[in-house]
Image: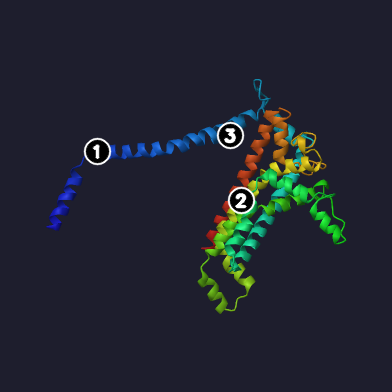
Amino acid sequence: MTATLLGSADAAAASVPSSGRARRRGRHRKWVLLFLAPWAAGMVLFFVYPLLATVYFSFTNYDGLNTADFVGLRNYVFMFTSDPLVKAAAYNTLWLVIVLTIGRLAFAMGVAQILTKVRNGSGFLRALCYLPSLAPPVAATLTFVFLFNPGTGPVNTILGWLGVNGPLWFNDPNLSKPSLTLLTLWGSGELMIIILAAMLDVPGDLYEAADLDGAGPMMKFRKITLPSIAPVLLFGVVNSIIFALQYFTQAVVAGSVASGSADAVGNSKLIGYPDNSTLTFPVWMYNEGFRSYHMGYASAMAVLLFIVSFAFTAILIRQLRAGKAEAS
């Protein structure tokens, strides 16, 4: 009886015309495209079109108001040969990329490793470490500039009690970027939580087996923890590099406030204070595009920044895949 029913079902399915199956597949595709339409529209309107427009304007002389005049590669030639501040901006951004990437990753891993060992009050400590990342960038920067004020700030006041002559912090060209780094590390709770989740997901059996083999804490960290959280670390590296390449708000606010002109944040005369030490590539791009109205040149800078970000990401992902292939 069962065989008869199965045979009848197969015969019925075989009797369905292929055109009917094609129509069903067509309707299925239409529904899929319908649900994808909002994402596709957003992708085109907010990424593809702005990207193509930026590439086009990078080859023009455009002020944002008048008609764009095509000038070829003149903007790129000027950027690489004649712009007096683009080298300083690129150097500061590269410095931040290296230091912030290493610092954020090391700091987040260190705090996460400590939190994995806490048993009592772990939830409170995790929330406490995460809260700084919720602070608005402008408010956080204003707070840090106040704390590290060389004359009246609490940090230098405490150092004075200890007999230490406090430095100038944000007012010193040699310490302004390290001061911004401290601000960024303080607000890296988001990355810390992600790494902490990855560490807590490492199977405990691996650590127990390592204990039986007599492995120490550093050996377990190198041989078990690091390989297990490698994908999350890659995400942290890529995220930190992109974050540093786009470093803007904190640098502008810190430079303007440290100069004593908080009521003129973003003033082109104050950008990069002190001595262009906080002048990052995005800050200079903003100044050229929205204060000097050199939108064509700013577009060329934006294209270069996009290419560098894409290249960093592609290289890191390729290295990770190569490492996985060798391991397998």
Dot 2 surroundings within 10 Å: few (below 14), some, or many (20 or more)?
Answer: many
Q: Indicate the amino acid at tag 1.
A: Gly
Pointer 2 residue: 238
Q: At x 63% / y 40%, what residue is drawn?
A: 306
Q: Is residue 112 above or below residue 312?
A: below
Q: Give residue 71's position: percent from left, percent from top.
A: 68, 25
CA gap between label 3 and label 1 equals 42 Å
Q: Which of the labelled discs sits on residue 264, or is there none?
A: none
CA gap between label 2 and label 3 equals 21 Å
Question: Which is more N-terminal, label 2 or label 1?
Answer: 1
Q: Is residue 143 above or below residue 160?
A: above
Q: In the figure, is residue 162 to the left or right of 62?
A: right
Q: Is residue 151 above or below residue 84?
A: below
Quadrant for the N terminus in the image: bottom left
Q: In the figure, is residue 216 to the left or right of 152?
A: left
Pointer 1 residue: 20
Dot 1 surroundings within 10 Å: few (below 14), some, or many (20 or more)?
Answer: few
Question: Which is more N-terminal, label 3 or label 2?
Answer: 3
Dot 3 surroundings within 10 Å: few (below 14), some, or many (20 or more)?
Answer: some
Q: Give residue 87's position: percent from left, percent from top.
A: 77, 40
Pointer 3 residue: 51
Q: Name the one closer to the observer, 54 or 284.
A: 284
Mark 3 element type: helix
Q: At x 63% / y 28%, what residue is drawn?
A: 57
- Asked whether disc 1 touches disc 2, contact meaning CB atoms under 8 Å apart, the reply is no
Q: Quadrant of residue 69?
A: top right
Q: Name the one closer to the observer, 7 or 217.
A: 217
Q: Indicate the amino acid at tag 2.
A: Val
Q: Give residue 173's position: percent from left, percent from top.
A: 82, 47
Q: In the figure, is residue 254 to the left or right of 190?
A: right
